[in-house]
Image (cartoon, helix red, strand yellow):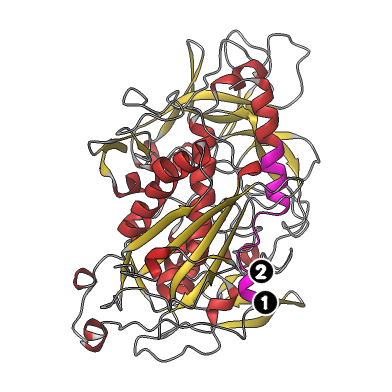
Amino acid sequence: MNSKLISFLSIIFILINVSFSQQTLNSTKNAHNIRFLEVEEDLSLTSNTESTFSDYPNIRIHVDYSLIEEGPHKEYIQTDLIPSVVDYLQGALKIKRPLKTPLRLPKAQKKICGAPTPNIYHTTGVEADFSLVVVTSALINNTCAAEAFVCHRVPTGRPGIGKLMFNTELLPLPKGNHLVHERNVNLAIHELVHTLGFNKPSYKFYIDEAGNPRADHFRAIQINGEERYILDLEPLTNRLRKHFGCNSIQGALLENDGGNGSIHSHFERRVFLYEVMTSGIIPGQRVSEFTLAALEGSGWYVADYSFAEPFFFGEGQGCDFYNGPKINADTEEYCAEERSMGCAPTGRGGGKCRKDFKSDGYKYYVPTLAHDCENAEAEDNASLQGFESFGKNAGSKCFTGTLGFEKSQQKTNSFCFKFQCQGEGLDTVLEVSIGNKKAICQAAGPMTVDGFSGELNCPDPLAYCKTVGQQYCPRNCMGRGDCINNQCRCEPGFSGKDCSVSVTKTFLGFDAKTSF
């Protein structure tokens, strides 16, 4: 990745962090003009009290690409981007009330969510439980990367047809670069989750186990004297209580900053910093159990939590953390000194301490591509060039310290070092590779390394190996392979670290030889 591309992507991350997507704007405007589809739902499984998880079928998602402008963006979206995301969601979600009849629209309806209605909806219809119309537009001088709308609902309120618009000005083509593709995959997952029901206009249609409308699940509460809105659903609330170690959590805190497309349609940035359903793109975001639990709590789906990625931000920190710790205090999750260097919460790479307008005044280390451990070109910015490791297969994570070649080095920097967790239980140690030298961290604290001035800040090995250092298969291999020894073994036709790349067609540098 050259310096121009790093700069371009850094600008995109900043822009999208400021204004991620306006996914509910149109839905909010049309909240009183809701259209329902004339389809028949299969209620047999929900009426059977003995139905189990395995009895429900996986959701069927249809995608229409006919409204995308011809060109490289269409080929990328249609070949690599959307199909991988659809496969992921079709694997992660089962449908409680599958449709028995096709999704079809009257011939008189010429528009769907403001776009021309694809012909298939007027003819055979679509054999699916949900259909997505994808469009593209080049929005110059616009910070909106994507918009997602719910266009039509089935009789019980579940989204039936949705629309997803990509702004091609802020959808860079990967050209073989896995960091760009990863960013786009997270963006697409985020938007599709919105169209499936995680958005404010959909909350009023949520139903309980009996199919009755939920009540009081989206409501205002008081936290530290401030009115905040929460989403109180099962199994979401119980999973939050267990994760944070706080039995008084009333529900998931929702974003309270931004425009109509942001407020209340995302998880609160401060509490769910690198979760994919926060408002804004951060490198290394993850689809946690909370996103899947929110969709399951709608009453429309059942989630397979093996598709959730590890999420440890704030884990076990208790009620004080969830409700709001002291601002500008140095904690495991937040930082105090503006522009100081540190590691992103996921250990993905280094970044500077700063806040944004959706972090409620809290500062955190924002990872940058220039210091991303999975970016091979970031080696040009390394503090210890030749002793750090970068790239998608490097197996390195971010560490901090004052290591240097000169004794005068006192400034804390971030480094990308390979590591290994060794031992079990209380005997766990962390082996950090600094070039050909090994530093064995047995406890949290600074340690010197032969041949270098300064110190390495050792994390607690036991905690680190259960969180930042935990190995896993990203997004359960998108449902396109098996997770063996924490690595994806992709099915024929797919490749990549998460099996998100199609190799049946070579495109933009993705091919059968790409380990991506």
Any mark on residue 218, and which?
A: none
The image quarter in which residue 165 lies? bottom right
Disc 2 and disc 1 in contact, CB within 8 angstroms: yes
Q: Which residue is mark 1?
A: 29
Percent x, y of residue 468: 49, 40
232 to the left or right of 400: left
Q: Which residues are magenta?
A: 11-29
Please state the total of marks drawn on the protein image.
Answer: 2
262 to the left or right of 493: right
Residue at x 44% of width, y 44% of height:
81
Residue at x 51% of width, y 36% of height:
72
**Magenta run includes residue 242:** no
The image quarter in which residue 301 lies? bottom left
Residue at x 37% of width, y 65% of height:
120
Q: In this view of the protein, can residue 66 be seen by the observer?
A: yes
40 shown above or below 291:
below
**Magenta run includes residue 18:** yes
Q: Which residue is mark 2?
A: 25
318 shown above or below 51:
above
Q: In this view of the protein, can residue 316 be seen by the observer?
A: no
As rendered, which of 80 and 446 lies closer to the eye?
80
Label 1 Cα neighbours within 10 Å, binned few <14 / some 14-19 / many ≥20: few
262 to the left or right of 161: right
Quadrant in which the N terminus is drawn: top right
